[in-house]
């Protein structure tokens, strides 16, 4: 396998944007090209677009060539759009990585994008209800908020996790997001009381326990490692990956409070990068809901099973803790434009390793970072490990 | 400026595939027996005759052993509440059901998701006994049935 480097990135403002699907592609793409030296759109051999539901949110399909055309890219090796619901962006990064590692292509661009605000927001809500098996779970009213609310209920029931511990995840991530100008929820901080007393969505989850509906785009340029210095003096590298999928319908899952696929994906990611959880300095995990981050601490091996609530309460996931989690603000603070989220996470590590983040969230000396996405009914967990060297 | 007006209908019927309920007849699915049985008040599923695996959802191929020799079995009409939630996140066409009680019921070891009828949030607790309730889904075009659960009386 060949080594793969990330040499340039672009990240649009996330939020309720006065912009359409293809505007977000152009914004992110331009930022990425502006971020690298000696690279033109025509140099991109392969192109991957992470987009979860352009069919429903923008009524567009076959979107990879549309995005390529918007950016003047004419791929001659591989072009595809990837869909893996909330992990669609990581699927795109993963395929670019796999293609370069395998020697099928040397220079690839990944764009992740989602335009989620619609004139009728009920329609947007409805779109998210077919992410779970529409015919056997979605039909029963199960979309992400009620599903993850039941995960929270079971985690509280089985492990004694508290409502306040869940709120602490939002407080921590919001603290980072409040100073991040790219974040949907920039400029605001929340207290535990504010989270717990926000509007009930699917109890025990309230509005501030949930990541938002968000517009956003992001882009990355990946190359075979020996080429990296042509494009930047400070590339970062992909060190390993892991991915696992168990079940889909609720009956097929290992459990609501136990995400075995996350543990299995993490074990494979650590093995492939030849590291242990103790080597991880910084983590970008999929906090689509506050409870998600708590379960992820456990399954990613940062703490024992059942002790995720305690982990956040003790500050182990904050600056100065065992592993700093979600310094950009997480999905909770940044918003969650489905196809762009995984790229936003990877870009945070890119900026962290290059010392390009503001001091308030800089993790000094971080060498190894992990990005994690779950998708659907937490049936799939996707993990990539990045390093400074 | 003078414009020619292009009219778009201000209302269209809810497209069939956006109403969330599965298509149920023989013409559209090979597990139509499930819906026929449901109409008779029976919650059924498939069980593999080769390896004994009890499935949920019903299938035409056993995912454990790839056998297609499956039989229909009736499930108990009762189960225990495994998890539940009151949700205000409601898809198109279900607005009138808001807020909605949704849960997972353990029926013979199968974890079956369901809407919960005839209850308020404060009536519910993990482990309580639940019973099957069959509903008829009306859309003026086709006759369909679906299952729900409610607290056991
Ligand atoms: Zn079998």
Image: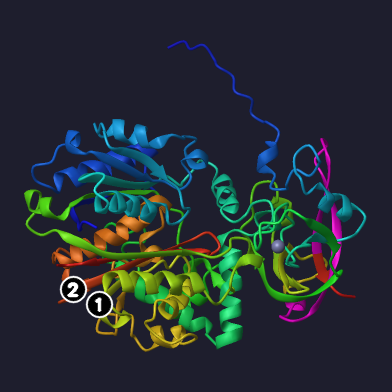
Residue A89 location (% of width, % of height): 37, 52
Q: What is the x, y in percent for residue B148?
A: 80, 62
A160, A230: nearer the viewer: A230
Residue A294 highlighted magenta (yes or no):
no
Quarter of the figure that contains the N terminus of chain A:
bottom left
* Residue under pointer 1: A281
Q: Nearer the viewer, residue A2 or A93?
A: A2
- Name the side, left or right, on which A144 lies relative to A229: right
- In the depicted structure, whether residue A240 falls above or below residue A217: below
Label 1 residue near ligand 1, CB within 8 Å = no
Tell me the CA gap for discs 2 and 1: 7 Å
Q: Quadrant of ligand 1?
A: bottom right
Residue B74 visible in the picture = yes
A214 with respect to B59 (left or right) = left
Residue A80 location (% of width, % of height): 37, 40
Q: Chain of mark 1?
A: A
Residue A4, picture quadrant: bottom left
State left or right for residue A219 relative to residue A304.
left
Chain ID of residue with mark 2: A
Kindly identify which residue carries mark 2: A367
Q: Earlier in the sequence, mark 2 or mark 1?
A: 1
CB within 8 Å, label 2 to label 1: yes
User: What residue appears at the point 50 percent right and 86 percent down from the top-left corner?
Assistant: A306
Q: Which mark is residue B11?
A: none
Comparing B57 with A201, the one in front is B57
Q: Nearer the viewer, residue B91 or B48?
A: B48
User: In percent of the image, x 19 and y 56: which residue is there?
Assistant: A5
């Amino acid at each position: 396998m060949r080594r793969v480097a990330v040499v340039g990135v672009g990240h649009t403002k996330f939020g309720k944007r006065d912009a359409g699907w293809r505007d977000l592609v152009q914004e992110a793409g331009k930022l990425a090209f502006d971020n690298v030296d000696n690279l033109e759109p025509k140099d991109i051999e392969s192109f991957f677009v992470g987009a979860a539901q352009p069919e429903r949110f923008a009524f567009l399909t076959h979107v990879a060539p549309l995005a390529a055309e918007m950016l003047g890219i004419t791929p001659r090796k591989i072009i595809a759009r990837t869909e893996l619901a909330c992990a669609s962006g990581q699927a795109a990064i993963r395929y670019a990585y796999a293609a370069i590692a395998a020697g099928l292509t040397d220079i690839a661009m990944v764009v992740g994008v989602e335009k989620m605000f619609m004139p009728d927001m009920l329609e947007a809500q409805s779109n998210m209800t077919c992410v779970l098996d529409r015919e056997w779970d979605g039909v029963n009213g199960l979309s992400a908020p009620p599903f993850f609310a039941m995960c929270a209920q079971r985690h509280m029931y089985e492990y004694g996790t508290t409502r306040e511990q869940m709120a602490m995840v939002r407080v921590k991530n919001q603290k980072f997001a409040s100073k991040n100008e790219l974040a949907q929820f920039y400029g605001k901080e929340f207290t535990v009381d504010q989270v717990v007393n926000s509007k009930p969505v699917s109890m025990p989850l309230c509005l501030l326990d949930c990541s938002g509906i968000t517009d956003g785009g992001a882009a990355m340029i990946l190359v075979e490692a020996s080429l990296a210095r042509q494009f930047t003096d400070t590339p970062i590298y992909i060190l390993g990956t892991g991915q696992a999928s168990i079940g889909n319908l609720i009956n097929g899952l290992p459990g609501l409070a136990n995400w075995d696929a996350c543990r299995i994906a993490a074990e494979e990611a650590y093995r492939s990068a030849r590291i242990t959880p103790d080597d991880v300095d910084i983590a970008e995990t999929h906090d689509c809901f506050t409870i998600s981050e708590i379960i992820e601490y456990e399954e990613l091996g940062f703490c024992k099973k059942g002790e995720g609530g305690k982990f956040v309460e003790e500050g182990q996931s904050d600056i100065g803790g065992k592993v700093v989690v979600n310094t950009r603000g997480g999905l909770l603070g940044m918003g969650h434009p489905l196809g762009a989220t995984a790229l936003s996470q990877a870009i945070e590590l890119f900026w962290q390793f290059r010392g390009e983040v503001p001091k308030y969230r800089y993790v000094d000396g971080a060498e190894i970072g992990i990005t994690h996405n779950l998708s659907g009914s937490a049936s799939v967990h996707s993990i990539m490990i990045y390093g400074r060297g | 400026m003078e414009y020619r007006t292009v009219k778009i209908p201000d209302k269209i019927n809810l497209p069939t595939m956006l109403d969330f309920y599965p298509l149920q007849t023989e013409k559209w699915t090979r597990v139509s027996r499930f819906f026929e049985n449901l109409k008779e008040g029976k919650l059924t599923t498939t069980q593999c005759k080769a390896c004994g695996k009890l499935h949920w959802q019903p299938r035409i191929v056993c995912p454990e052993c790839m056998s297609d020799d499956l039989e229909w079995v009736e499930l108990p009409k009762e189960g225990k509440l495994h998890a539940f939630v009151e949700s205000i996140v409601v898809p198109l066409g279900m607005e009138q059901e808001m807020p909605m009680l949704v849960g997972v019921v353990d029926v013979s070891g199968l974890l079956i998701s369901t809407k919960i009828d005839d209850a308020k949030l404060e009536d519910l607790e993990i482990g309580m006994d639940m019973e099957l309730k069959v509903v008829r889904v009306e859309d003026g075009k086709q006759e369909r049935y679906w299952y729900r659960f409610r607290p056991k009386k």
